């Protein structure tokens, strides 16, 4: 029997995931189902199933969206061609891309226009990496964290930029950065790291937990890059770690001889899945928190959604003489209204 659980803090939903889930919930409240979403809104099986049950259809090609239907683009960012095709096909397009991914897209565009060859560290076929490379495919060479710089040969060694998928592990970024800096002394990198603050925070707390835990459980889905990175961080420090989608995935043999279990969750995993693990393990001496920082980041709903709802409100106001404050007050509550609240709303 497990004696104690150490729970990571922070864990679970980041600001980008919060924004995306709330935005797709608004789409369900505004439009008749089905509502379409290009790619999974976030990489979590439970969240995706919840939206599917509520009437969202996830597609991997914009051509699958019926002409004139509303569509949302996922939090991982989309290729410029996809955005353009969606705008030509759909009645309403809401882009729920994380602002941190948008930052990298801007960097790619700017550095390519300035004549730089771009080294992009990412995972092949990951939605974010695919969308980012598509911004300037002629200027980008994508390398995996495992392979590193390899035989990359820029046109001008003095004009090389290094960018990264936001959900990479810190050690993955660091290893390739060191290689590239050695080979290209004038290497350009962003002043602020491309790595997501939430990704970094969750990895930092796992590093601290690895010192005292016999095993670490990471709640999150298989296609979640940042979740997989948490497992690798623990394992690199010599601590056994397992990824689980939910409590039913725990294999009893994992717990044999284990006294202290560390518990965390990837940035797209709902909190109730973490609580279910705590309840199932029922540690004899309870649980404690491993706290490294507070997260107060907030990303507002996508501009297109804010504009659309404002226009909708004006139309209703004109027809029903409803005070404007009644229609715009929702923006005042958006900071306190959470993705967990939104998911509860669609799962009633």
Image: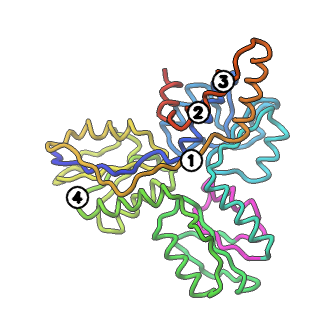
Residue labelled with disc 4: 214
Residue labelled with disc 1: 16
Q: Which of 181 and 317 is in front in this view?
A: 317
Q: Is mark 3 on a helix, strand or loop?
A: helix
Residue labelled with disc 2: 332
Q: Which of marks 4 and 1 is nearer the N terminus?
A: 1
* Quadrant of the rendered image containing residue 176: bottom right
Q: Distance between the residues labelled 4 and 2?
A: 44 Å
Q: Nearer the viewer, residue 23 or 236?
A: 23
Residue 187: x, y in percent?
A: 64, 81
* Quadrant of the rendered image containing residue 138: bottom right
| Relative height, residue 13 to residue 54 (above, below) | below
Residue labelled with disc 3: 325
Q: Distance between the residues labelled 4 and 1?
A: 32 Å
Is 238 colored magenta in this rendering?
no
Circle 2 Cα neighbour tier, 10 Å, few/some/many (<14 / 14–19 / ≥20): few
Circle 1 Cα neighbour tier, 10 Å, few/some/many (<14 / 14–19 / ≥20): many
Asked whether, in this view, residue 294 is left or right of residue 142, the answer is left
Q: Distance between the residues labelled 2 and 1?
A: 18 Å
Q: Residue 35 carries which label?
A: none
Q: How far apart are marks 2 and 3 (CA)?
A: 10 Å
Magenta stretch?
116-140
Asked whether the residues under the numbered discs 3 and 1 touch, taking CB atoms below 8 Å apart as contact, a structural biologist would say: no
Residue 285: x, y in percent?
A: 14, 44
Q: Earlier in the sequence, mark 2 or mark 1?
A: 1
């Amino acid at each position: 029997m497990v004696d104690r659980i150490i729970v990571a803090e922070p864990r679970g939903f980041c600001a980008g995931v919060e924004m995306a889930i709330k935005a797709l919930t608004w789409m369900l409240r505004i439009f008749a189902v089905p509502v379409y979403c290009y790619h999974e809104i976030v990489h979590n099986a439970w969240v995706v199933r919840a939206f599917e049950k509520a009437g969202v259809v996830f597609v991997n090609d914009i051509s699958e969206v019926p002409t004139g239907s509303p569509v949302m683009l996922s939090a991982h960012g989309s290729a410029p061609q996809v955005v353009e095709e969606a705008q030509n096909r759909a009645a309403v397009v809401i882009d729920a891309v994380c602002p941190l991914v948008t930052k990298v897209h801007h960097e790619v565009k700017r550095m390519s226009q300035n004549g730089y060859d771009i080294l992009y560290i990412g995972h092949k076929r990951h939605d974010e990496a695919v969308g980012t490379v598509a911004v300037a495919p002629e200027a980008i060479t994508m390398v995996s964290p495992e392979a590193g710089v390899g035989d990359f040969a820029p046109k001008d060694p003095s004009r090389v930029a290094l960018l990264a998928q936001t959900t990479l592990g810190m050690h993955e970024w660091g290893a390739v950065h060191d290689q590239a800096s050695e080979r290209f002394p004038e290497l350009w990198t962003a002043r602020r790291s491309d790595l997501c603050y939430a990704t970094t925070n969750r990895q930092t707390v796992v590093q601290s937990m690895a010192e005292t835990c016999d095993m670490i459980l990471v709640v999150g889905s298989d296609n979640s890059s940042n979740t997989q990175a948490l497992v690798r961080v623990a394992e690199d420090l010599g601590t056994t770690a397992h990824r689980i989608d939910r409590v039913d995935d725990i294999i009893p043999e994992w717990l044999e001889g284990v006294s202290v279990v560390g518990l965390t969750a990837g940035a797209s995993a709902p909190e109730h899945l973490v609580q279910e693990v705590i309840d199932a393990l029922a540690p004899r001496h309870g649980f404690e928190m491993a706290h490294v920082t507070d997260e107060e980041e907030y990303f507002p709903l996508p501009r297109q959604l804010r504009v659309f709802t404002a226009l909708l409100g004006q139309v209703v106001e004109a027809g029903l003489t409803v005070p404007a404050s009644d229609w715009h007050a929702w923006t005042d509550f958006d900071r306190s209204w959470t993705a967990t609240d939104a998911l509860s709303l669609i799962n009633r």
